[in-house]
Image (cartoon, rainbow, N blue to C red):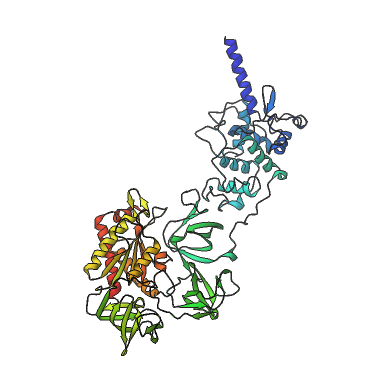
Amino acid sequence: MNIKKISLILCVLFISASMFTIHSASVSAATNSNITFEDVTKNHPAYEEINYLVSLGVIQGYFVNGKRVFGPNNNVTRGQAAKMVVVASGNKPLIVNKSSFSDVTVGTEMSGYIERAVQLGFFDKNIKGEFLPNKALTRGEMSYVLTKAFNLDTSEYEGIDSPFTDVGITHEYVKYINTIYYNGITNGTGKTYLPNSTVTRSQFSLFVARAKSEKYRLELPVKGVTVPDTSQVIGLVKVTTDGLNIRKSTDSSSTTNIVGKVNTGGKLSVYAVEGNWLKVSYKGAYAYIFKQYAEFLDADGNALGAVEKEVTTKNAVNLYVKPTSSAKVISTIKANVKLPVYKTVGGYYLTQVNGLPGYVVANSTTDTVEEEKPNPNPDPGTPPVTSGDVLGRVTVANLNVRSQSNSTSAVLFKLNKGEYVQVNSISGYWAEITYKGQTGYVHKSYLKLLNQSAKPLQNRVIILDPGHGGKDPGTVKGSVSEKSITLKVSTQVKQLLENAGAKVYMTRTGDTYPSLQDRVDFTQANYGEIFVSVHVNSAANSSAQGTETYYAISTGDMYQEDIDLATFVNNQIVNNLNMKNRGVKQEQYYVIRNMVIPSILVELGFLTNTEDHNKMTNDQYVNLFAESIYNGILQYYKKQ
């Protein structure tokens, strides 16, 4: 019985040793050339490379049921990998009297190759005194082993990002993965490298053959092909938040693609706008940032500033990155398109198209004459009517004063921006005014109505828009939704405004879902004079926090009024609730870009940030948010 047990143990040891013996260094090349494997046919993708390693004595395989096999689909272990690279690199086993590892037995064939591989620095980790010879080799470890065993130069690839989305610039093996990639040893799996995945015996044979002989290498990727070409820059942005993640792909659900961070004020060159993402350059490679947290600058790196005027293109014109016709063309603008002008540089206007700033030739445009835009389908219901001691400050240039309260009657004269008129009465969207003894009618959207004796908000028509609602909860954190916060705050603002004498209308008063166009139509039907949309923010990075308020630039709008209103409201919230000030920004959100009255969209805070979340879900702070919006509106109307 004991003899049988001994025989069985010896048999098992023999088979185990045979499986580990991938090659025999003592076997001559002539003998090796006759080796064939039952499980590696001529159609196998690694057939040529495996036979190349056989000819070098690197692998020999093992026998199963009298047939020589290679086991190409089995994972290669750390011990097997050590033996293969020691032999392939022209080295011999190291004989030692005492093992360096508790899990490697002195005197075994495995011991000599592992000791030599570690002595030569082919493996980088000593894990608690163990080598883990039977543990499968990972692809990350493989990059290190091959780089060291075949003395590949890593100096060109230090401190640069990898071409793979799952290997960030801070990954422990990034420079080794870069090295084997740019030396034609591996090209990964699509856009990924899978550094924690295992390697099969046939795959490792491919990689060793490529590292050993240039004959088997892949077509070398040219370092720098994916490096940004600065001639293709379409703009420059300034980051508006701290700790903004810079990613190598447009996936905010993962952290493996984060290659760096940038803080407020950091500037990045932009190569493309891809939905909500900006394609930028970072440390010599393409990367992505979330568009919401960046502000476009002019070609000199300065803020765009306020809009000076509006022009209309006379014919198709190019939008250039810089104020010169030799600069990159961002896009071509059709004829009869109205554009905002921020400044004049030489013979070019700085403008903005679809959110991208650029320059157009000035003499290819003409100044736009602002026309009234009464609602084409006014509500037949009874419009609000007011009269008394009210002044109107003109908010646009060349405002037509008409003989009757419609847009088709004769133009009596024009008013300039900033001039004041006496408002005699208001009916719907039309105001009867008197200017220097002449009486006529203007569209009230182009007047800032200023009460002279009554309270500042008396009879002002204000539209409040609680964001989202119904089937659209907005951002959600746990049991708290954006739609519930915006409705609660807006309802309190309404009460405060009405107590001050204003006429207030809300786009929703319950958990309903008016579409974006419904909100625009509602505003027009109720002859709104200002529009305030209330929202709550969110971000993948929980450190993002604070209040920000948006205005839009649209044809016929009075941009400075939007900016004033946004600034007053934003500052009130920031100061009263000690919120981080993310500033007043321009963005073409639907509900504000489709208004000709002063319109803003305020983001109270970030539901994804603990501090902001606690404030927006606390009744005392909710009251403060409402009071702050109210005070901002009041401050706007007090400004004459």
User: Horizontally, is 486 left or right of 99 in the view?
Assistant: left
Q: Is residue 414 above or below residue 104?
A: below
Q: Quadrant of residue 83?
A: top right
Q: Could you say where residue 113 lies in the image, as x and y percent from the top left?
A: 63, 32
Residue 534, position as x, y percentages in the image: 34, 62
Percent across and percent down for residue 225 are 63, 57
What is the quadrant of the C terminus in the image? bottom left
Residue nearest the observer in this picture, 187 or 606:
606
Rendering quarter of residue 507: bottom left
Location of residue 303 (image quadrant): bottom left
Quadrant in which the N terminus is drawn: top right
Q: Residue furthest top?
A: 1
* Total tally of numbered discs in the picture: 0
- Which residue is the extreme one toward the bottom? 437
Check the image and report above or below for 6 versus 355. Answer: above
Observer-nearest residue: 365 or 371? 371
Farthest residue in the front direction?
A: 380
Left or right: 632 with respect to 86? left
- x, y percent for residue 272: 54, 62
